[in-house]
Image (cartoon, rainbow, N blue to C red):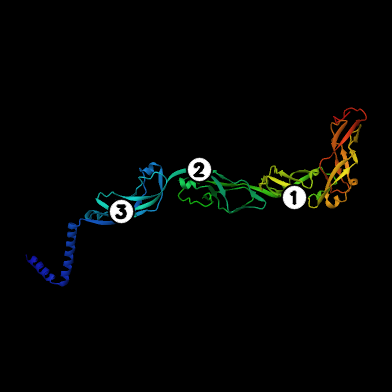
Amino acid sequence: MKLISIIKRKFLRSITNNLSIAIYSFIIAIIAWFVISITIYPSTPKTINNINLSLDISQTSADENGLEVISCDVDKINVQIEGDRSQIGNLTKDDIVAKLDVDNVLVPGTKKLSIKIENKSGVDFKVNKVTPDSASVVFDKIETREFELVAEYPNITFEEGKTRDAVSCEPKTIKIKGPSAQLDQIATCAAVTNKTDKLNSSYSFACDEIKLYNGSGAIIDNSSLDIEATNITINIPVLTQKTLDLSVEISKKPSNFDDSAIKLNWSTDKITLASQTSSLSEFPDTLEVGKILLSELDLDYTKTFRIDTKDFINQSNLETVTVSLDSSNLDKKELIATDFSISNAPANYDFKVITSSLNVVLVGPADEIAKITTKDIVVDVNLLDCKNVSPSFTYPVTVTCPNYNSVWAVGVANVTLACTCLLYTSPSPRDGLLS
């Protein structure tokens, strides 16, 4: 009893102190406010921040249509809830699930979807506000497609006289998995080696990276794609190449003919050829595209030749070439020949030219053509290759101008011959001649 009396006296003394009175008043006010709040306002709002937005769409209409979430512009939300202050006070973001409302998503595309809140705490509360309350979501189907590989080797060069053949990748194709809309954009799939080298012979490089290009040649971001790119090899075969002049052969020309007067115009006069040979000496000096009969070269001559590169690879992609006669310093003249000679006539036969005159057209340098007369023309009937003659037959002649070896005759001229057998002999190697 004595102890209680002492405490009572100390308390009464303390409340007479102003500071003590203030402290006790504040504590009593807080207790009173808490009691009144619980009694008059049992519900209170609470905001929970940084709740992860779930992108799980399993067992939804989108999932049933084979769609997947490709991207979403919201990853976290804030939610304001309201409930019994004694129950919601301890709730955290782990007690709340934020989901996308995907009930009406049936086809691929970009959708603006509301965000719904699910309570997994067991505590009763209502949702007052969700921030943000919607999200922009891209849906698409995930597919796996196979693409053909092309090679890229930006830092690979070749020694002088060397070039590449058809470059290949092994394997030739790769599989890429990703959204169908993004796969649709892929026009080119490139296996790239970033190695730096100067090649003199064939070589194989390991692929360093895969680059994807759209139809405009722009690079496609492939970070969201699953690319099966393992053990890809880029094979670069190396060829020897040489650039050659194109040429033609002027055929059926006299032995003393000077063809320096014949100048030809070419649609292109060079071609680049390649071969797997390692030596340039195995290439010809020129590539002959064909033959031109001297008698065909009139002033307006032009002809297109198809190019045959035989065993060489045509690096110029040149299929044809057109050749024409440069007639700028040439002229032509028509003369009448009346004097004919016969050469290489078979023995025991007598041949006589029945044709009395022949029109001859000559082409050559203008200064020489101006001087030529009929006396300068030699018209020869060369019977060396004559077969199956009859008492009267036609045969082509050879026209030359011995004094002007840069002049030639154009066109085909024939004369009529009479043949008489002088003496019967046994058949000779020239079977078929009149006996």
Alpha carbon of mark 3 to alpha carbon of mark 2: how far? Answer: 44 Å
Disc 1 residue type (three-letter): Asn
Instruction: Please tell me how many numbered marks the rendered image carries.
Output: 3
Front disc: 1 or 3: 1
Callout 3 crowding tier (Cα within 10 Å): few <14, some 14–19, many ≥20 = some
Residue 93 disc label? 3
Disc 2 residue type (three-letter): Glu
Alpha carbon of mark 2 to alpha carbon of mark 1: how far? Answer: 51 Å
Q: Position of residue 195 (x, y in %)?
A: 57, 53
Q: Nearer the viewer, residue 59 or 1?
A: 59
Q: Nearer the viewer, residue 288 or 376?
A: 376
Q: Secondary structure at mark 3?
A: helix
Q: Quadrant of the N terminus?
A: bottom left
Residue at 15% x, 72% y is 18
Compared with 415, 188 (above or below) is below
Q: Secondary structure at mark 1?
A: strand
Circle 2 is placed at which residue position?
Answer: 146
Circle 1 is placed at which residue position?
Answer: 265
Q: Position of residue 139 (x, y in %)?
A: 41, 47
Alpha carbon of mark 1 to alpha carbon of mark 3: how far? Answer: 87 Å
Residue 203 disc label? none
Sequence-earlier tag: 1 or 3:
3
Q: Position of residue 251 (x, y in %)?
A: 80, 43
31 displayed left or right of 319? left
Callout 1 crowding tier (Cα within 10 Å): few <14, some 14–19, many ≥20 = few
